[in-house]
Amino acid sequence: MARISGVTIPADKQVHVALTYVYGIGPKTSMDILAAAKVEPTVRVKNLTDSEISKIQDYINEHYIVEGELQRIVTTNIKRLKDISSYRGLRHKNNLPSRGQRTKTNARTRRGKKVTVGGTAKKAVSKT
């Protein structure tokens, strides 16, 4: 099992797929890293040599911000937007989509499970 940037990447997957398990590295970035480190993208992680792993790790450390540091940057950016009460910050505070999507319908992932408003059911007749 190889560890890259503090993340144990799966050993049975190809390197270009396994690198995407690191926060901040997507498919395109993964291919760019492997091309720069001169590592074959289709090799399985378990078949990588220690020198290849260290080449990949060194290139990532030198050129990319990943994992905890990137998460910290994103969190502080969102906190800054909330503090200055920008429109986007208010949308983040209220757990609503911040990039202009409609919310009358859809947006369920951001807003959560649908809550039905009460008072629509007919009341049962009670004997007096």
Image (spheres, grey):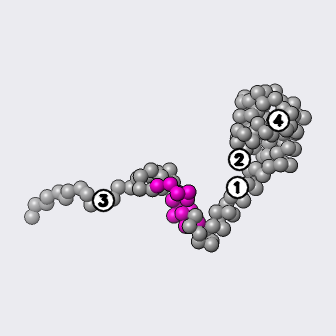
Q: Amino acid at mark 2?
A: Tyr
Q: Position of residue 80 (x, y in %)?
A: 66, 68
User: Where does label 1 land, which residue?
Assistant: 71
Q: Nearer the viewer, residue 8 or 62?
A: 62
Circle 1 crowding by C-alpha within 10 Å: few under 14, some 14–19, many from 20 = some
Q: Tell me where the magenta segment starts and ends, as one range.
A: 89-102
Residue behind mark 3: 118
Q: In this view, which residue lies farthest toward the bottom?
A: 84
Instruction: Give the CA distance from mark 3 to mark 2.
Output: 42 Å
| Residue at (70% x, 42% y) in the render | 26
Query: Tag on residue 35?
Result: 4
Residue 57 versus residue 100 in the image, above or below: above
Disc number at residue 23? 2
Q: What's the residue type where badge 4 is placed?
A: Ala
| Mark 3 Cα shell of 10 Å, populated few (<14), some (14-19), many (≥20) | few
- Three-letter amino acid code at disc 3? Gly
Q: Earlier in the sequence, mark 3 or mark 2?
A: 2
Confirm whether the magenta stretch covers residue 93.
Answer: yes
